[in-house]
Image (cartoon, grey):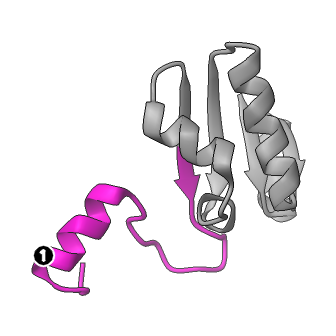
Amino acid sequence: MLFLGEDSLAEGFSVIGFETHPNPAPADVDRVFRELLAGRDQAFVIVDDEVMNMDVEHLKRVRREGGRIVVVAVPPLAAPPKLGSEVADRLASMFGAGL
């Protein structure tokens, strides 16, 4: 179980046993996912919206392939809740941005 993202969220995830990577740079995010892929590890990874939206090759690969590495995003603490999945994005484009 890993968390990559905002340091205020990382602190909470570390308390419940996650390996955390607070405020990671894109190169650090890429390294973490590259190592997970190379080690053929199974992992549950939570990232914040900022990390999910980074242009990081190995994160994109994990999301494309699916399988043994599950990645989910959480919104920032101070932001209003928003559905942030690809399905939610498709629905918003079909039915309007008011979702």
Q: Identify the residue under disc 1.
A: 94
Please name the residue shown 68% across and 55% down the image.
56
Is residue 25 positioned above or below 62 on the image?
Answer: below
Is residue 13 positioned above or below 88 on the image?
Answer: above
Viewer-side residue, 15 vs 74: 74
Q: Is residue 76 visible?
A: yes
Which corner quadrant holds the N terminus?
top right
User: Residue 17 vs residue 74: left or right?
Assistant: right
Tell me if mark 1 has few (under 14), some (14-19) or many (20+) residues whose alpha carbon lies within 10 angstroms of its own: few
Is residue 89 positioned above or below 48 on the image?
Answer: below
Q: Is residue 11 visible?
A: no
Is residue 18 positioned above or below 24 on the image?
Answer: above
Occupied quadrant, residue 23: bottom right
Percent across and percent down for residue 48 are: 65, 59
Please name the residue shown 76% across and 49% down the image.
4
Occupied quadrant, residue 38: top right
Name the residue furthest left: 95
Which residues lie in the magenta part? 72-99
Viewer-side residue, 77 vs 99: 99
Assign a secondary structure to mark 1: helix
Percent across and percent down for residue 18 are: 78, 33
Please name the residue shown 84% across and 40% down the image.
31
Percent across and percent down for residue 93 are: 21, 78
Amino acid on which disc 1 is placed: Met
Which corner quadrant holds the C terminus?
bottom left
Viewer-side residue, 83 vs 29: 29
Numbered-mark total:
1
User: Residue 3 vs residue 90: left or right?
Assistant: right
| In the image, residue 67 lies in the stretch drawn in magenta | no
